[in-house]
Amino acid sequence: MTQDQTTDSGTTPQNAAPWRPSRTVAVVLAGGTGTRLGLGIPKQLLKIAGKPIIEHTLAVFEAAPEIDEIIVLMASGHVAEAQQIVTKAGFRKVTKVIEGGDTRNATTRIALDAVGEQDCNILFHDAVRPLLSGRIVRECVNALWTYSAVDVAIPSADTIIQVDENECITDIPVRSTLRRGQTPQAFRSSTIREAYRRAAGDPNFAATDDCGVVLRYLPEVPIKVIDGSDENIKVTHPVDVHLADKLFQLAAAKVPRLADQRTYSDEVAGRTIVVFGGSYGIGHDLTELARRYGAQVFPFSRSSTGTHVERPADVEAALKTAFEATGRIDYVVVTAGILEKGALAEMDQETIDRVLQVNFVGPVTVARQSLPYLQHTKGQLLLYTSSSYTRGRADYALYSATKAALVNLTQALSDEWAELGVRVNVINPERTATPMRTKAFGTEPEHTLLAAEIVAQASLDVLVSELTGQVIDVRRSPGETPTPVVPAQGSRSTSTTPVG
């Protein structure tokens, strides 16, 4: 159990006994049935960004060093499905997947029984809040060294009104004192147990909020509120599904960097990587980087090997070459692409066909041909989009449209291939200094562009990660000057020919 035991002596309740929890348990409440979403399955089993919502949520607690154990309370009749998700994902901290109660109160009581009698920290979290941050988990656990009850909330951006039975306003509370509650809600086990013990003697007891139980039955206990986040939304209504999916899509996935070069070598050495578009720009730099760590990399492109990604026969031959040389293919990367500027109405059919074929049909072709190899190694397909995927822009409508299509392709394939153990992700780099960009936009100030080698490093981090279905933004830190790419001797990375 990793916790920061720093406390604020100015806010510590008087006469508080020293708290020595045996462990910290995250209780994931997954009892919802999806009624308001109009689904035939519980909403926590709905897939977003390539994974069931509950899997995203469990992954946060699995990765949090402050959490020692996870208990899942699942909707009636769906325990086996939840257990299958836990088993397949390899969540080691999950010790129990059990059926919840008919109400939130009943589910909390079941959870307390499952936790046991030892003094511990307990975090109750809605399974359908998959965008919980590690920061919130950490602050909840740390606050329990000082307080015995902790809530998570955010300020209300809207004015809150109180109405009567006729839907007429009776009061408008001061907004500055109002907060919108979220989860997790965290407690010292002795506190939440005592609150429910007292509530059991109240024939009118009914609550949907555990902090509310403490507030009502243990009014002398202060409840600390820590800052939540706007992204920590609860998937309740149909629109929430789209919002959560978009948040996953737009958020910069935090890809952990490995500790040192030796660790990268341990992960990459002996792996086989096929790079389509590997002669210039990002593809070239990724090829060189992976080779330095011991990977067996096979770059293919129109210029160097005569490989056209939109031609099934070319892609098949390239993959066969790599497989016959090494006996495996672990990662397939598609950096190939072209950018043709100009108004769509003025573009000739040949140019239109070429852009669509290389930028979209090519990745589709590579995906189809790669699957048998990646299924065998439980590998990953990595694609590349552009910031223009979020909004089509004049004079390169086809480029923007095909890049948006790759994001949707990534998310769809990560869903389709999840059962096969194959991961699919897409890199979304900031404006990057590549030959393709130079050809389209001419020479630009170096300090305004991201170096291709930075994108290559991020790409390698994604390849060795367990991410799937993610759009990974690669951005310069504020004020950072991109490190210029130093081409390997004899390389042609300064050419203005587009990659692919």
Image: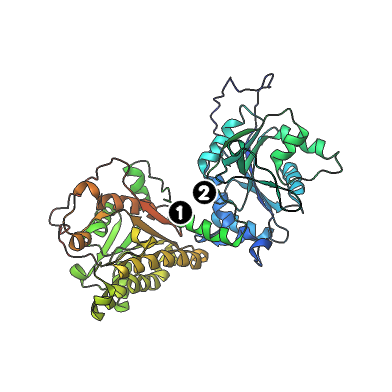
Q: Position of residue 133 (x, y in %)?
A: 52, 44
Q: Is residue 105 left or right of residue 53?
A: right
Q: Quadrant of the N terminus?
A: top right
Q: Quadrant of the C terminus?
A: bottom left
* Separation (CA) of disc 1 from disc 2: 22 Å
Q: Quadrant of residue 482?
A: top left
Q: Secondary structure at mark 1?
A: loop
Q: Secondary structure at mark 2?
A: loop
The disc placed on residue 231 is 2
Farthest residue toward the left?
A: 490
Q: Quick one: label 1, few (<14), some, or many (20+) residues within 10 Å?
A: few
Between circles 1 and 2, the one closer to the viewer is 2
Q: Position of residue 214 (x, y in %)?
A: 73, 35
Residue 213, relative to residue 436: is it above or below?
A: above
Identify the residue at horizontal 36%, vertical 74% (top origin).
Answer: 365
Q: Which residue is mark 1?
A: 466
- The reply to whether residue 399 is visible in this rendering is yes
Q: Amino acid at mark 1?
A: Glu
Q: Nearer the viewer, residue 88 or 207?
A: 207
Identify the residue at horizontal 65%, vertical 66% (top origin).
Answer: 38
Q: Is residue 109 left or right of residue 410?
A: right
Q: Is residue 436 left or right of residue 168?
A: left
Q: Position of residue 159 (x, y in %)?
A: 59, 45
N-terminal-most mark, 1 or 2: 2
Identify the residue at horizontal 24%, vertical 72% (top origin).
Answer: 307
Q: Amino acid at mark 2?
A: Glu
- The reply to whether residue 385 is visible in this rendering is no
Q: Nearer the viewer, residue 193 or 201?
A: 201
Residue 253, relative to residue 171: is it above or below?
A: below
Q: Position of residue 245 (x, y in %)?
A: 50, 59
Q: Quick one: label 2, few (<14), some, or many (20+) residues within 10 Å?
A: some
